[in-house]
Amino acid sequence: MLAVYIALMVCTMLPVIVMQAGADMTVLVWLVFALVLVKALLLVDHFMEMKHAPWGWRFAAQGWAVVVVAVLAGVHAVG
């Protein structure tokens, strides 16, 4: 469980570190999109304890992040 906490902290800190390193804003946006997916996976599997749940329930719980990121990425790519 400690590894999950550390991974979530790294996912939270990484965009700030990348921004301070002078990365382009587009890189930062796509990095945040990817980290949202990683964090959703970790949260559903470990904190919601769905790691051993039936596949359909687990897919439904993790699917919201994919839908949200896809919609936001589409809006970002168009705009």
Image: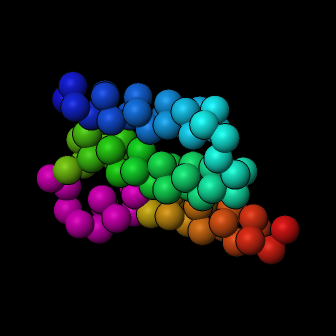
The residue located at (57%, 40%) in the rendering is 18
Q: Quadrant of residue 17?
A: top right
The residue located at (25%, 39%) in the rendering is 46
Q: Please identify the quadrant where the C terminus is shown.
A: bottom right
Magenta-drawn stretch contains 63: no
Secondary structure mostly seen in magenta is helix
On screen, residue 31 above or below 70: above
- Residue 10 % position (x, y): 40, 33
Q: Quadrant of residue 26?
A: bottom right
Judging depth in this view, the residue of 39 and 28 nearest the camera is 28
Magenta-drawn stretch contains 55: yes
- Residue 74 % position (x, y): 70, 72
Judging depth in this view, the residue of 51 and 24 nearest the camera is 24
- Residue 13 % position (x, y): 50, 30
Q: Please identify the quadrant where the N terminus is shown.
A: top left
Image color mode: rainbow
Q: Quadrant of residue 60?
A: bottom left
The reply to whether residue 62 is visible in this rendering is yes
In the image, farthest residue toward the right: 79
In the image, farthest residue toward the left: 52
In the image: residue 46, left or right of residue 37? left
On screen, residue 39 above or below 16: below
In the image: residue 51, left or right of residue 26? left
- Residue 68 % position (x, y): 60, 60
Judging depth in this view, the residue of 57 and 51 nearest the camera is 51
In the image: residue 73, left or right of residue 34? right
The residue located at (48%, 49%) in the rendering is 35
| Magenta highlight range | 52-62
The residue located at (74%, 71%) in the rendering is 77
The reply to whether residue 40 is visible in this rendering is no
